[in-house]
Image (spheres, rainbow, N blue to C red):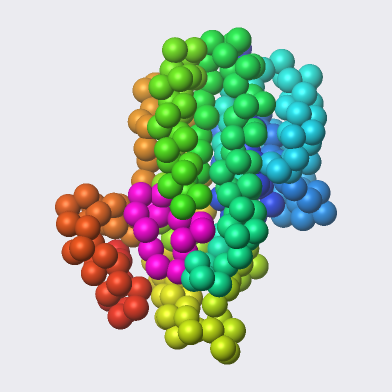
Amino acid sequence: MKSKRTVLVTGCSSGIGLATCHVLSRNDFMTYGTVRNLSKAKKIQDLIKREGLSLKILHLDVNDNQSIKLAVKRILSDTGRLDVLVNNAGYGMFGPIEEITNQEVKKQFETNFFGTIRVIKAIVPTMRKQGNGIIANISSMVGRFGVPLNSAYVSSKFALEGLSESIAFELEEFGIRVIVIEPGVVKSDFFHNVRVKGTEPNSPYRKLMKMRVTFLDKAMKNSGTSSYDVATTILYALNSKDPRFRYVVGNDATNSIRMRNSLSDRKFMEWIRAGIFQGRGLSK
């Protein structure tokens, strides 16, 4: 009987991470979901109790090398191997670069970019010795193009895309595949999971920020992609005999990336500006 593949998913208290743990554990993966704060793992613990899933919850803070080391050590002690890493931990930040402090930008990168690097560095030696493995990095459609008032988050995803492309060359020789998942707007509890600057009464960007947040709120309600659609795409990629490097998820992401590839820089910027600040939408 073929043994279950072991997968580590970071950032699992809600959203894409929670859905990914649920979907993978339902589909014959021995899944280890990790959270920075175990007190926020109630949703995933309820799933385990209700469905008897092959899913375990571990503490892992992507900004803490020791917690990463301990989590990986626990998984290897339990299963002896690590077949898949899904790097999902991260958060969003909205606001004008003028009003976001350097420290806030650094913190964004520490989690979204350097956190991913820390976990990759911790698991690659095991995958290399095994001669196989898959690293799935959760990026975003805005890892491919810029959008206004989102520069810290966007640049962290641009960096993640460059990292993913580069290490794909390095690791392929050892049987390790790297894939990138690029969702569009995902339905979520937005205001509990992102940080917003530039909405203060005296901010010169307040009007623009109001339009930006309104656009995003409408997009999530009317056309946002389900976190389970993203999780199902991850499952499909992991079960593919020859997985692609990139998987785009959501009509808005598909259309936006198509427009980015077909328009000039100036025309694409006009299209984005019209969609966000004039309410014309990006999924048409």
Magenta span contains residue 146: yes
Taking 226 as reference, is 115 above or below it?
above
> In the picture, which quadrant includes the C terminus?
bottom left
Taking 235 as reference, is 177 above or below it?
above
Residue 214 versus residue 12: which sits nearer the camera?
214
Image coordinates of residue 63 in percent, x first then y, are: 71, 43
Image coordinates of residue 108 in percent, x first then y, are: 60, 54
> In the picture, which quadrant includes the N terminus?
top right
Residue 171 versus residue 175: which sits nearer the camera?
171
Image coordinates of residue 91 in percent, x first then y, are: 60, 56
Residue 137 versus residue 170: which sits nearer the camera?
170
Give the extent of the magenta segment: 141-154
Q: Is any atom of residue 117 visible in this view?
A: yes
Residue at position x 30%, y 72% from top? 273
Classify residue 70 by image quadrant. Answer: top right
Residue 30 versus residue 102: which sits nearer the camera?
102
Magenta span contains residue 147: yes
Taking 219 as reference, is 49 above or below it?
above
